[in-house]
Amino acid sequence: MLAINNLHVSVGDKAILKGLNLQINPGEVHAIMGPNGSGKSTLANVLSGRPGYTITDGEMIYKNQNLSELSAEERAQQGIFLAFQYPVEIPGISNVNFLKTCVNAVRKQRNQTPLDAIDFLSKVREKMAVVDMDENLLYRSLNEGFSGGEKKRNEILQMSLLEPTLAILDEMDSGLDIDALQAVSKGVNALRDENRSFVVITHYQRLLTHIVPDFVHVLFNGQIIRSGTIELAQELEAQGYGWLTENTDA
Amino acid sequence: MNPLELFQQQYEKQNTTQNWLNDFRQQAWHDFQQQGIPTLRQENWKYSNVSPIFKRDISIQQAAQIDLASIIAKAAIENYDCYRIVMVDGKWIPEHSVLPTAKEVEIIPLSSLSSVEVAKVEQVIAAGKEQSKLHPFANLNLALANESILISINKSLSKPIELLHISSAQQADAIAHSHQILYVNAHAHANFVERFISAQEQRYVLNSRCDILLSEQARLTHVRFESQSQQASHFRFIGVTQHRASHFDSYAFDFGGQFIRTDLVTRLVEKQAGCVLHGVYLVNQKQHVDNHTFIEHVAPECTSRQYYKGIIADSSRAVFNGKVIVQNTAQKTDAAQKNKNLLLSKTAEIDAKPELEIYADEVKCSHGATVGQLDEEAVFYLQARGISEESARSLMTYSFGDELIAQLPDNALVNLARTYLISKLPEGNVVKEYLQ
């Protein structure tokens, strides 16, 4: 479903991804780990279409389309979802109205009939229960004044409403306490099926005990230097990144 | 003809048997002649260039034939049960107006006032004299408007009143002067909605003036919608005098017109009077909107608040000049002012100037002006959820403007303001869906 071939990405003059290769098939959960500065967020950003990144070589093919030909909103409509590491607060935009607008935009694209306010509300309530999210957060401005845990729950709520094909979770666990971590993991796991794939970006092995990946890749200095399964993550936890990176040429 | 010659001719043609009115007109004409048409060299006009308007071949607006009934029907505010005063080019049209009994409201042309009513009008105009002297178009209006009416609110209104100003717009480059005097009796509460519309697209000039006096404990909510043709110029003066414990709640929405200049002046002349001035202006293409507000604290213990928000797109331009003077007789004044502006393009321009002059020492005064752009991170966040870039910008622009709209006291007016706002945003239908 997603093939990244020899991807080189720069921000301004600085090269960040230097020949990244990754193959993701439907239904797979891939974890991306690596030290700070390795390019993990860059990968998430360039997949979702955030401005400011230049592809200097290589390609990303999603469902047989060259991703760089699609705008950010087209990628979202085609089923790519990015759960932000730092979800944006947008005062004055009502959370529930915003959620309904996004859902109906995607439904329109898929030739489905839009949901009216009542149908939408019952769907939202059902999904909020999965992530233990307080209903009053629906009636507030989008993410405004939400705690870290509430913001991440709101990201997972959006994801469960938009039903993406490829979900990218950018450091989902940053800033979360144990309860919040369990709640958002529950939300993610409830969405796993054979047609949906996940890219789980994280520093820590802890998240991966809740969201168990099929594959683990280590990103270092803009390239994937090792791939494995959950055991790889456990070894990194025990030995640190130095174990791998010291034996790799930069 | 040179506009000054044209105005001179019009002034000399005035005839009225009312000496009191002649005196006012003469003084106003004299003041206008001293000031002339403003130039960019005058501080209060330095961001608004009126000379292109007056270089045109201006003529006096003649009576025009328009299908009033259908214009009024089309313009009716949905779900708003109100009385209506219809003005066409400054002339009151009683047959299309819907009014309560004289116990609540009386409308009398200035040419037929009783002596009691004359005294009221003199009181209103004299109260605002010092301020209106500084406004050339307000003086021109007083000198030349010959269909002026007194609207006297005798007791609290059972329904709001819509003052619908229709510019016939049949002649290009014609000018009309429109003048109303609003006298609100002691303890009376009134809700007024003033709307300026055009019968068709046309380039013309409207010079309008409203003198308002709020007696002791009177309360007036005054909502104004500017939605004339995008080729029209409008000079508007509103002068308010507030007596003891009176309250003036003003909302100004500037959406239409090519060149709009509003001077809103309010004087708090007795204790415990208060005013709140809100405004939203949304300009695009090559529109120019200029809001000058002036609040004078003369009496002690009065409160004033101002909050104007501007949205400036394309190559349009906005000016906000908010002036507050606290005289040395106005101890325990509480005055605050805020102006926030959103620039949506590289060629949009805003000139924001708060002015504060304080001559008393026991006062609380604050002012602030900001100019910003849309948060690009927020735009990307919305795009990453499938919302097109243009829709995302419109949603965020909408929410910026809606903050003050949501404070309007009546749902029907909230919906009207939102309709105007959405009609000026690209991908407005996405915003409409968002609101459902």
Image: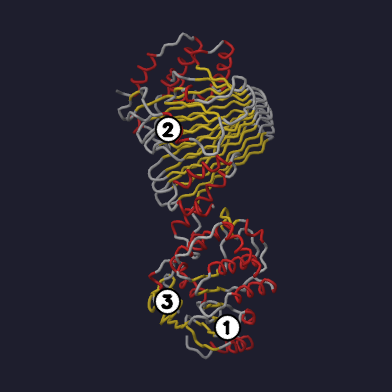
Please name the residue that numbered disc 1 is placed on. Answer: A213
How far apart marks 3 and 2 lie (CA) works out to 55 Å
Classify mark 3: helix, strand or loop: loop
**Mark 3 or 2: the one toward you:** 2
Q: Are marks 1 and 3 on the same chain?
A: yes
**Mark 2 or 1: the one toward you:** 2
Q: Are marks 2 and 1 in contact (CB under 8 Å)?
A: no
Q: Amino acid at mark 1?
A: Pro
Q: Amino acid at mark 2?
A: Ile
**Chain letter for mark 1:** A
Classify mark 2: helix, strand or loop: helix
How far apart marks 2 and 1 lie (CA) works out to 67 Å
Q: Residue at x 51, y 82 (%)?
A: A219
Q: Is residue B383 visible?
A: no
Please name the residue that numbered disc 3 is placed on. Answer: A63
Q: How many residues crowd mark 3 within 10 Å: few (<14), some (14–19), many (20+)?
A: few
Q: Are marks 2 and 1 on the same chain?
A: no
Front residue of B393/B413: it is B413
Q: Residue at x 67, y 36 (%)?
A: B363
Please name the residue that numbered disc 2 is placed on. Answer: B71
**Chain letter for mark 3:** A
How far apart marks 1 and 3 lie (CA) works out to 22 Å
Residue A236 rendering spot, x and y as whole percentages: 60, 87
Q: Is residue A240 visible?
A: yes
Q: Are marks 3 and 2 in contact (CB under 8 Å)?
A: no
**Mark 1 or 3: the one toward you:** 3
Q: Is residue A124 above or below residue B57?
A: below
Front residue of A206/A13: it is A206
**Chain letter for mark 2:** B
Q: Amino acid at mark 3?
A: Lys
**Going by the image, does B274 lie left or right of B309?**
right
Front residue of B293/B19: it is B19
